[in-house]
Image (cartoon, rainbow, N blue to C red):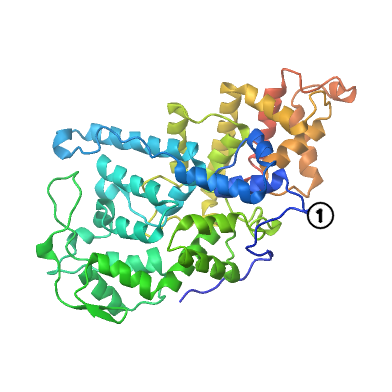
Amino acid sequence: MYTMPPPSCASGTLSPYLPTSEKPWTVQHLQHLYRRLGFGTNRQELELALAQNPVEVVENLIDKAMGAAASPTPHWVEWTAADYADDAEQVSEDISSWLMEWVQDMAQHPVRGKLILFWHNHFVTQLETHYFPSYLYQYHQLLQTYALGNFKNFVYEIGKSTPMLLFLNGATNTKYEPNENYARELYELFTLGRDNGYTQQDIEETARALTGWNHFEEWGKPLTFNQSSFDKESKTIFGRTGNWGYEEVHDILFEERSEQIAQFICRKLYVAYVNPQADESIIQQLAQTFMANNWELAPVLKQLFSSEHFFDEAHYGVQVKNPYELFLTFFNEVDFKTDTEEALDGLLYFTGMLGQELGTPVDVAGWQGNRSWLDTARLSGRWRTMSWKVYQVMDQQPEKLTQLAYQLTGDLNTNDPALVVQKVMDHFLPVSLHTPEIYVRATEVFKGEIPQNYFDEGSWNLYWDTLPWQMTLLLQYLVRIPEFQLL
C-alpha cells in the first residue's frame, strides 16, 4: 500500500486564490505559477498577467494549452523498413528530426509541453526498444493528444500503441504464452500504484484478457489485434468474471478501482507540480474532482493551480529543476529565442548529458526527479552548461540582457549596482536570499573590471555599453548558487 510521506507546512484550501490588500497578487505569485505549470516566461508577460485575477490567468493558460495545434505530420509517418531500404542513417536522421520537433513544441507550448514530459515519465517507453521514426511519432502524438485530455482514454490508447506493446512485451502476450509484464505495470505504475487494490491473480487474469495485440505485417507498421492469439476463456478480474478482452479490462478497472486511480494520479501530479511532500487532504479533494469530471484532467489542473493552497509560499523553492526546467525556464525568463536549429540541438544534447534524454527514461519507473538530479557529476555539469548558455545569450542576443536589466530596475538612470544585482538575482530565484554576503559578493562580480571610482562618483549607469557583459558575469555567478537549482 501507499506510504504517506510527512506533510508539508503549507496551508490553504483548494478554494480559488483571492488577492486581498493584506495578500496582494504579485509578480512573485505569477513567476511561481509560470515556472511550475510551464517553463517560466518573460517579464512583459508577467506584467500583463498581473492585470488579471489568478483564476483567469490559470484558465487562460490551460485553455490555450488544450487548444494548441498538434505538431505537423511528418512526410515519413507511414514509412516502413522497406521505404528506408536498410538506410540506418536516414532512420536516425528522421528520429533526430522528430526529437527536435518534440523539443520545439515543448518550448512553444510550455504548459502542454511540460505535461507531455510528465506523461512521458509516467507511461514510459524507451526509444531503443523500437528505434523507428513512425513509432516515435505515434508515441509522441498520443502524449500530445491526451496530455490535458481524458485519462481513461489515455490509458486505453497507450496500452495498444506499438511502442508500448514492444516495450512491455504486449507483442508477445498470447493465449499460448501469456506475458504479465504490461498487466503488472498497468496497475503498479500507470493507474493504481504499487500493491494498491490488486492481487497477483488480477495480474494473471488481466494478462490473459490483454492477449492478441501481436499481429505484425512489417517493421514500421502498427501492431494490430490478432483474434487467433486471443484467450477466449473466462477470466476473473477484481471479482468480476466473464470472457473479458482489452476494452472490458479498462472498463472494469475504472469502475472497480476508481478511487484508487483518482488518488494515485492526483498524488503523482501534486508531487511533481506542487510539493514532494504530499498533502493527502488536498489530494483527496482533487481525486473527487477527477472522478466527478469523468477522468478529464483539465478540471483537476484548473482547480489545483488556481487554488490558495498552490500559491502558499511554503511551496516555493522546494523542488529541484529537471534539466528541461533548468534551461527552458532560464531562456524564457531572459526572453532568449530557442526556435533555431542550433538552440534545439543544444537543448537535446545538454539535457541528455545531464540525465534527461528524451525517449530514454532510465527504466520503466522513469526518472526519479527532484534531488536525484543533483549528484556530484550532474551538479558540476549544470554549472558548466549554464555558464555556457549565459555566454551564448550575450554572444547572440546581448540586447536581451540590457532589456532585462531595464525592466527589472524600472529606472534607466539608476547608478546603484547593488540595486541592479538584487533585482536580477531575485528575479531568477524562487526565494529571496537571506544571506547579505551573497548579494555583496554578486555586486563585486557585476562590477567586473570597471574602476570603483566610477561607482563611487555615480557616473556608471545602465546606459553603459559594458552592461551586457556585466550581466553575463552576474548570471554566470548566479547559476552556481544552490537556490538557482530550485523551482
Which residue is at 20% across, 58% downward?
A: 171
Q: Please, which residue is most extreme toward the left here?
A: 228
Q: Pick whichever, 201 or 233, lies toward us.
A: 233
Residue 233: x and y in percent read: 14, 76
Which residue is at 13% across, 59% downward?
A: 226
**Image height of 473 relative to 138, above or below:** above
Quadrant containing the N terminus in the rendered view: bottom left
Q: Mark 1 highlights which residue?
A: 22
Residue 20: x and y in percent read: 77, 53
Residue 81: x and y in percent read: 16, 39
Q: Pick whichever, 471 or 153, lies toward us.
A: 153
**Image height of 101 relative to 135, above or below:** above
Which residue is at 38% across, 63% downward?
A: 190
On the picture, is 181 further left or further right than 335? left
* Amino acid type at image mark 1: Glu
**Image height of 150 relative to 94, above or below:** below
